[in-house]
Amino acid sequence: MTIGDTEAPRVAALDAITAQCSLAEDAVTFPKANDNCDGQITATHDVASFPITSNTSITWTYTDNADNTATQMQDVIVDNTPPTVTGNLNAITAQCQVTEAEVNAAVPAAGSDTCPGEVTVTHNIPADAFPITADRTITWTHTDEAGNTATQTQDVDIDDTEAPRVTGTLNAITAQCPINAENELTKPAAPSDNCGGTVNVALKTGTSFPIQAGITTITWVYTDESDNTSEQTQDVTIADTKAPTVTGTLNAITAACSLAEADLPVPTATDNCDGTLTAETDVSFPIMESQTITWTYTDGSKTAMQTQAVTITACVLSATGDASEAVVFPNPSGRYVEVQSPVESPIRILSVGGELVLESMTNTKIDAASLRSGLYLIQLPDGRLLKFVKR
């Protein structure tokens, strides 16, 4: 009968070997295995050279007396201490934004490491997140050659503290008419801002309207998206140099005896500016005789004039019917009273007491300028009386 050993050695699980910086050959403990048969078991590894200075795995091979073999892996962890970082990183501050180049230029000093070798420092901001335009925190990672890491954080503070930049002087505004509201003004162009974005342009709160005649200084306020403001003043001159506009000719007015103020229509004119437009004439009322009157239109600063013919005809009394009354007004240079009749007849003008004052004929203008104020009677040939009052 032939007896043969065909079973490989039996191995148990191996714990990882840990070492700081490097692992020397004499620091490696050869593991043991069991075999189904008595005899010596040899263990060999595949490490080509010592010391081991980075993480790796050792392959152990176990061989019994019958040349049966078994293999096993054992991890080697070299340097499991992360780099040491100390102190706080100063915040990165900027007015508007931080670029990738600016972040890369602010890489902190690499942390110290227990083992020789390079410590690399990287940040967690992806390339498509640049430029940074709002506050955020950067995480810096310090990595040694064994892959151990330590982290540091750094704040990025974005603060826009600069007001929009205004240069030069705004041109003065000259207008004919009062300006009643902000929307009647032309806003100046928005100035540039250090951070770009929209700059709002508005009149300073409290600006009074309407802006009337003369020179008024207004203030424009420029506000950026961070509520920083700057101001610029502008002179506004209101100078109404255009007189009211009159067109055409005023129709002549004809009145018998006299024309009272209430019976005289007030004409109108147009003006380039809104507001009150007055029309006045300097004649005395009532108008007792024909003349040309002048209307003066005033818009508050300028005037225009227009003439109008007024014709005053004689007061006419009819010699038919019952006695009637006429009124003759004072100071009528050349003021006349006429009694009309189909047949020319003599008439007598009597005082209210019956005293003869004047004699005349019908259909003839009687000059009443010399008569005193009062009631007078006109006696017709048939004895009937007409009366008129001179005031």
Image (spheres, grey):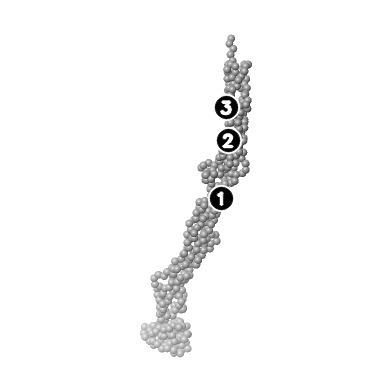
User: Considering only order in the chain, which callout, 3 or 1, is on the residue closer to the N terminus?
Assistant: 3
| Residue 197, visible in the rendered structure | no
Measure how far apart labels 1 and 2 are at the Cα level.
39 Å
List the single residue furthest toward the top.
1
Instruction: Check residue 49 in the rendering and tell me which mark sits there, or answer none.
Output: 3
Query: In this view of the protein, which residue sits in the foreground, 139 or 147?
Result: 147
Measure how far apart labels 1 and 3 are at the Cα level.
57 Å
Q: Is residue 337 left or right of residue 106?
A: left
Measure how far apart labels 3 and 2 are at the Cα level.
19 Å
With respect to residue 115, does 249 lie above or below?
Answer: below
Can you tell which of label 1 and label 2 is closer to the viewer? 2
Q: Secondary structure at mark 2?
A: loop
Question: Which picture quadrant has residue 382?
Answer: bottom left
Query: In this view of the protein, which residue sits in the foreground, 186 or 50?
Result: 50
List the single residue furthest toward the left.
343
Q: For mark 2, what is the residue? A: 117
Tell me which residue sits at (59%, 28%) in the image: 50
Q: For mark 1, what is the residue? A: 159
Tell me which residue sits at (54%, 53%) in the image: 162
Q: Amino acid at mark 3?
A: Ser
CB within 8 Å, label 1 to label 3: no
Q: Is residue 261 left or right of residue 147?
A: left
Query: In this view of the protein, which residue sits in the foreground, 89 or 164?
Result: 89
Query: In this view of the protein, which residue sits in the foreground, 337 or 10?
Result: 10
Question: Which picture quadrant has residue 304?
Answer: bottom left
The percent coordinates of residue 103 (x first, y second) are: 54, 44
User: Considering only order in the chain, which callout, 2 or 1, is on the residue closer to the N terminus?
Assistant: 2
The percent coordinates of residue 39 (x first, y second) are: 62, 16
Q: Amino acid at mark 1?
A: Asp
User: Considering only order in the chain, which callout, 2 or 3, is on the residue closer to the N terminus?
Assistant: 3
Q: Secondary structure at mark 1?
A: loop
